[in-house]
Amino acid sequence: MFNVPTISLAEARDVAEACLAKAQAEGAVIAVAVVDSAARPILLLCTDGVIPVAGEAALAKARTAVIMRRPTEALELARRDRPLGTSIFGVYEVEGGVPLFVGADTGLGGVCAGGFAIAGSPVEIPLILDAGIAAWAAALEKEGLYGTPGMDTH
């Protein structure tokens, strides 16, 4: 049987709550989704007043970040020749999703343990993502592990 590292529910909560706290501090309304190493949903939290589609968008971005092992912003930049909002095979190429890696200083050598994404308010996306990334790094440090988000996170 394979033993693949995956983000725990407690770690997912830490990441999501860090994003929500930063969003609140910035006056943003968001949905934040966290998925495991197989891109299955672990957690979805929404601030009051977020647009109804934000939860689904956050889940799609988080899944895409894990499946593609890249931040969704990198995919968005690569698809500039296609209309905004297009999707190929369920890949959602819009800024806001980040894969989370364990066991390497860069995503290239590590194992993807999951990912997270935000959607809703278009302001302060990098600041909110950074809060989630910092929570992930703190969780790994607590466990004596190391890891990073995907290359060029945003």
Image (cartoon, grey):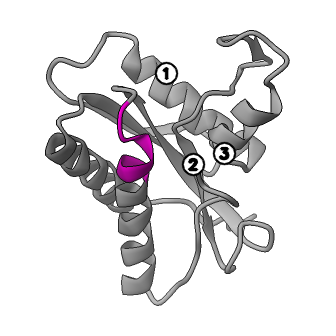
Q: Which amino acid does label 3 sit on?
A: Val
Q: Give the range drawn in magenta.
A: 123-129
Residue 132 image point, x, y percent:
38, 56
Which residue in the structure is indicated by mark 2?
Answer: 98
Alpha-carbon distance for marks 1 and 3? Answer: 14 Å
| Front in this rendered view, residue 9 or 140 | 140
Residue at 36% in and 84% down: 142
Residue mark closest to the camera, 2 vs 3: 2
Residue found farthest to the bottom: 144
Task: Assess disc 2: are there few (<14), some (14-19) or many (≥20) residues with their C-alpha within 10 Å of its C-alpha.
Answer: many
Q: Does residue 52 show up magenta in the picture?
A: no
Task: Assess disc 3: are there few (<14), some (14-19) or many (≥20) residues with their C-alpha within 10 Å of its C-alpha.
Answer: many
Residue 119 image point, x, y percent:
41, 28
Q: Is residue 101 above or below residue 79?
A: below
Which residue in the structure is indicated by mark 1?
Answer: 57
Q: In this view, does 90 lie above or below 31?
A: above
Q: Which of marks 2 and 1 is nearer the N terminus?
A: 1
